[in-house]
């Protein structure tokens, strides 16, 4: 891999589902368990994967809506509780890191970058996924929607994740797959890398990222392109 030493001191904030890990099989599988229990036909993975990224409640709502139904407000707490219980028990049955993710993350961390997760998934579930996939040691902080002042696309979520990792937003990059990631990066004034292989109803290219990548192997160099040098590296030092 190319020289990544210029990443030293930078903070790279990653979305989780659809960016770091391909979790759609387990998330949609859990959604379909809930739908079946409610007497509703399950959804094909290819149809429901792009509903992911706004949290479990939104995923449940979208699953019902796709079958022409609405979730009654009084029913949501019970549906949510059942969803979380089943999903937590099957959190990494089929979920896997995207190809090249582990190698790229290890290279960026070895170069001195801080890595954090900025996700609309609950923090506890996010940590469970990372531990199950032996990825937790790579991240300096994991900040889910429940641990932030407001969820993505609010800038405060991204800023909170960067600061939790010991970094500053003026030397951070957001790496994601969807409109929530793009919105948070733009609102925070941070550069944006989007992956083309994630979960999004709006094509990633249409979200106008600073860099669009087709594989994880492209992310380290994309971050190098977008980050200003740290003071100690000015003038070629």
Image (tube, rainbow, N blue to C red):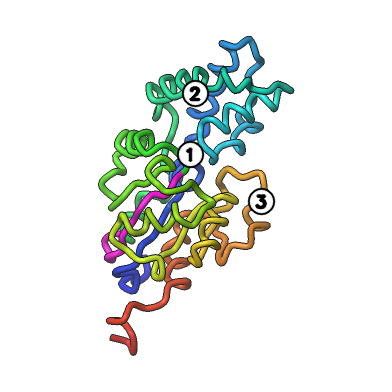
The residue stretch that appears in magenta: 109-119
Residue 190 drawn above or below residue 88: below
Residue 84's image quarter? top left
Residue 121 x %, y %: 45, 38
User: Which-is-in-front pick, marks 2 and 3?
Assistant: 2
Count neighbours of disc 1 (C-alpha within 10 A) and say few if under 14, some if 14 to 19, many if 20 or more. many
Give the labeled residue for mark 2.
80
Left or right: 152 as drawn, with respect to 136? right
Q: Was residue 116 drawn as part of the magenta stretch in this picture?
A: yes
User: Label 2, label 3: how many angstroms apart (C-alpha)?
Assistant: 28 Å
- Secondary structure under badge 2? helix
Residue that lies at the very extreme toward the bottom in this rendered image = 235
The kind of secondary structure element at disc 3 is: loop
How far apart marks 2 and 1 lie (CA) works out to: 22 Å
Disc assigned to residue 203? 3
- Among numbered discs 2 and 1, the one appearing first in the sequence: 1
Identify the residue shown where x is 50% and y is 21%: 77
In what quadrant of the picture does the N terminus appear?
bottom left
Q: Earlier in the sequence, mark 2 or mark 3?
A: 2
**Tags 2 and 1 touching, CB below 8 Å:** no
| Marks 3 and 1 in Cβ contact (< 8 Å) | no
Residue assigned mark 1: 22
Q: Which mark is residue 207?
A: none
Query: Where residue 81 sits: x, y (%)?
Result: 45, 21
Query: 2 or 159: which is nearer to us?
Result: 159
């Amino acid at each position: 891999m190319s020289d990544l030493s210029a990443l030293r001191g930078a903070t790279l904030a990653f979305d989780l589902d659809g960016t770091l890990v391909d979790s759609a099989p387990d998330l949609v599988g859990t959604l379909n368990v809930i739908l079946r229990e409610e007497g509703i036909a399950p959804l094909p993975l290819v149809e429901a994967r792009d509903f992911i990224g706004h949290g479990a409640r939104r995923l449940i709502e979208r699953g019902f809506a796709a079958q022409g139904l609405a979730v009654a407000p009084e029913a949501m707490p019970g549906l949510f509780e059942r969803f979380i219980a089943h999903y937590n028990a099957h959190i990494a049955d089929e979920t896997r890191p995207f190809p090249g993710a582990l190698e790229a993350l290890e290279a960026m961390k070895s170069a001195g970058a801080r890595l954090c997760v900025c996700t609309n998934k609950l923090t506890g579930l996010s940590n469970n996924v990372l531990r199950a996939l032996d990825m937790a040691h790579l991240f300096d902080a994991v900040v889910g929607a429940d641990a932030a002042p407001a969820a993505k696309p609010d800038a405060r979520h991204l800023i909170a994740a960067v600061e939790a990792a010991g970094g500053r937003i003026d030397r951070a990059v957001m790496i994601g797959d969807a409109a929530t990631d793009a919105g948070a990066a733009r609102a925070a004034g941070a550069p944006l890398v989007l992956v083309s292989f994630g979960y999004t109803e709006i094509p990633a290219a249409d979200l106008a990222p600073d860099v669009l990548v087709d594989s994880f192997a492209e992310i380290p160099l994309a971050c190098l392109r977008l980050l200003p040098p740290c003071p100690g590296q000015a003038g070629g030092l």
